Image: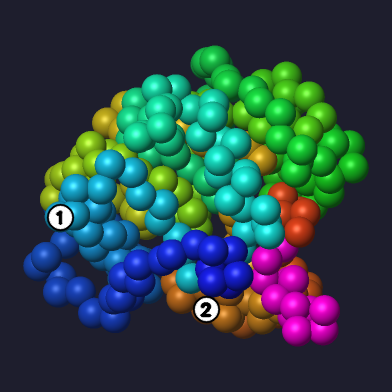
Amino acid sequence: MSSYSDIDLTIIDGVTFVLEKTRPPGGAQMTKGQIGCWRAHMDMMRYVVDHRLETALILEANVDWDMRIKDQLEELGKHMPGASKTRPYGLEWDMLYTGPSLHLPDEANLGPAIRYRDKTVGTLDRSGWDRLEANWVARDLVAYQAQDHERIVHRAYTTYATTSYMVTLDGARRILYQLGLNQQSAPVDVDFFEALHRRELNGLIVVPPLMQQWKTGDAAKDSDILDPDRASPKTESDPCSVQSMRYTLVYIDIF
């Protein structure tokens, strides 16, 4: 999929075993899958720090994106605070969520938002966002008064899933300390947003998200963390990807 999108990836191995004594304080009771997920994300933060990457895009294996993802990322970069030719997404943040499964804003303190036009985004009433959990994308866009064919960037608050996000070098350092050494109270996505709540991390989110989880049709295969004994309704991407790359791959050879 990355080859067809002209995206170069660095693969970081997953984790199957973590010594209990290497976990941070906190005593969180988590499954082996949740602990492995935490360790894998900390390993990615260490890679960013060791290689001194100013910004990095972190992707989980079940990610899907729109065929026009490079255009979408370029458009996002044009509107990020502090962006420049050498720093295309700026450095004035720690985390930028590009593919959460659910976001609940701080309704009592929404804060400012950056709005920008993106021709790959649909209209508010015909994009199928009502199929998403809690209708969160549509509610987020309405809360920040977005118009049709617009994306918004604003402060991240309660954000579930780590399918796709960006970090800066300083952000990776803070994550390694806060989540890798200081404390562990919940699965990694929850620990992320709790750090956002405490303002230990400066997080942003782009809505609608640029990337999403791909649904295989078998819920047990959709996650290495959970093992549900039920089937997903069907093989599908998220309505935020109008031209799903994974779905399109099935038909590439036909054309």
Whether residue 108 appears in magenta in the rendering, the answer is no
Q: Nearer the viewer, residue 8 or 219?
A: 8
Q: Nearer the viewer, residue 46 or 38?
A: 46
| x 24%, y 53%: residue | 48
Q: Say which amino acid is labelled 1.
A: Asp
For disc 1, the neighbor class at 10 Å (few under 14, some 14 to 19, many from 20) is few
> Residue placed farthest to the front in the image?
85
Magenta-highlighted residues: 244-255
In the image as oriented, which residue stretches furthest toward the left? 21
Q: Secondary structure at mark 1?
A: helix
Residue topped by disc 1: 50
Residue 250 within the segment the image draws in magenta: yes
Q: Which residue is disc 2 drawn over?
A: 227
- For the residue marked with disc 2, what is the amino acid? Asp
**In the image, residue 53 lies at what x, y percent?**
25, 48
Q: Is residue 121 above or below residue 197?
A: below
Q: Which residue occupies the extreme right position in the image?
A: 126
What coloring was used for the rendering?
A: rainbow
The residue at the point 60 percent across, 70 percent down is 4
In this view, the mark in front (2 or 1): 1
**Label 2, residues with CA under 10 Å away: few <14, some 14-19, many ≥20:** few
